[in-house]
Image (cartoon, rainbow, N blue to C red):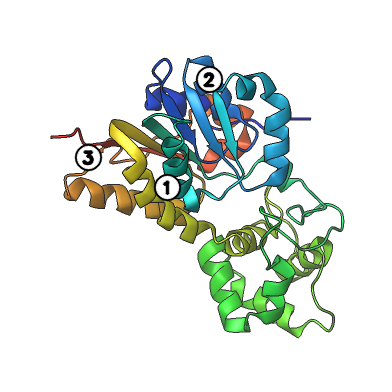
């Protein structure tokens, strides 16, 4: 069942300016919302995702597009984007890349997965690996990271105001925190009664997920590669949901423009409409930025 709603779907694909028969990269395939839109507009897509479940879903849902050669699914972290594209171009499987899209959000399927440790519901293992090939799980981080570093992690990656008290409670726990329920209950106990719609453990879970999957480092590594593989005049479109993600993109695009590598089209990020937020609450923190690579002189 696909109950994931793609955030800023029309805005992002419109920003790409899809041309008939041209190749585009969807760096974060997820449930294929952006990929489908690009294909519908006549583009061809190389889609990246390091989550095996997402790849299997894509192979089943986009079977005819894959057979037709309009879609290539790659189970790989976008931090390895350049090597993959160079290899595909060397084998004449794809042509020049006319646009690249990254949606740094997490799919509804991942966030609600009890078995994989993303959800507060149920009592799954505290895992949080988007790529099951990664070695370190969230429970491992809680066990090995010192209290002061845990505090910093929750504060910086999650924006958690009670970071210090939560880290202290985790390290003082008589039993290792190994399940989602244990962590959610511990955070709820430290923070007290739930205020508003957000679960008390939301920011702690977010911080751990970002750390386990080295999400910010991957974005930093990927952006220069994206610019390199992109054809002149092509666009890079990013949708970020976390301040840390958006900050990296903002500074990178600004730096590129100052070096005359192209134009930063969004001095201020574009945000979803009130109508979109009212139908999809997860869109509320989305920020979209666009960079156009300078034309070849």
Quadrant assignment for the N terminus: top right
| Residue in the picture at 52% in, 27% down | 9
Q: Name the image quarter holding the C terminus.
A: top left
Q: Local crowd at mark 3 within 10 Å, few (<14), some, or many (≥20)?
A: many
Q: Is label 2 or label 3 in front?
A: 2
Residue under the point 62% across and 83% down: 146
Residue 3 percent coordinates (x, y): 73, 30
**Between discs 2 and 1, the one toward the N terminus:** 2
Q: Which mark is residue 82?
A: 1
Q: Secondary structure at mark 2?
A: helix
Note whether 76 is above or below 64 in the view shown.
Answer: below
| Gap between marks 2 and 1 measured at Cα | 22 Å
Which residue was labeled with disc 2? 39
Residue 297 horizontal side relative to residue 177, left or right: left
**Is 247 left or right of 153, judged from the image as shown?**
left
The reply to whether residue 8 is in sight is no
Query: Residue 234 at x, y = what percent?
Result: 31, 31
Q: Pick the residue in front: 10 or 21.
A: 21
Assign a secondary structure to mark 3. strand
Mark yes or no: residue 209 visible: yes
Relative to 2, is 81 above or below? Answer: below
Name the residue carrying label 3. 262
């Amino acid at each position: 069942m696909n109950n994931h709603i793609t955030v800023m779907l029309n805005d992002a694909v419109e920003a790409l300016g899809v041309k008939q028969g041209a190749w585009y990269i969807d760096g974060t395939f997820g449930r294929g919302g952006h990929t489908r839109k690009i294909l519908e507009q006549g583009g061809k897509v190389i889609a990246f995702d390091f989550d095996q479940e997402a790849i299997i879903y894509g192979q089943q849902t986009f079977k005819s597009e894959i057979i037709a050669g309009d879609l290539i699914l790659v189970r790989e972290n976008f931090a390895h984007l350049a090597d993959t594209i160079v290899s595909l171009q060397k084998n004449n499987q794809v042509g020049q890349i006319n646009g690249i899209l990254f949606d740094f959000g997490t799919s509804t399927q991942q966030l609600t997965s009890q078995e994989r440790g993303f959800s507060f519901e149920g009592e799954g293992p505290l895992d949080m690996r988007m790529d099951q090939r990664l070695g370190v799980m969230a429970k491992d981080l809680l066990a090995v990271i010192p209290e002061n570093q845990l505090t910093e992690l929750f504060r910086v990656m999650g924006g958690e105001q009670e970071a210090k008290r939560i880290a202290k409670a985790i390290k003082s726990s008589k039993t290792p925190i190994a399940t989602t329920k244990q962590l959610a209950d511990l955070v709820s106990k430290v923070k007290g009664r739930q205020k508003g719609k957000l679960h008390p453990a939301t920011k702690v879970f977010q911080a751990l997920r970002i750390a386990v999957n080295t999400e910010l480092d991957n974005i930093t590594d990927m952006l220069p590669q994206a610019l390199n593989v992109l054809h002149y005049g092509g666009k890079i479109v990013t949708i970020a949901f976390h301040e840390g993600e958006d900050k990296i993109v903002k500074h990178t695009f600004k730096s590129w423009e100052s070096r005359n590598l192209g134009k930063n089209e969004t001095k201020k990020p574009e945000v979803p409409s009130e109508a979109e937020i009212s139908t999809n609450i997860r869109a509320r923190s989305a920020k979209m930025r666009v960079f156009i690579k300078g034309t070849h002189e």
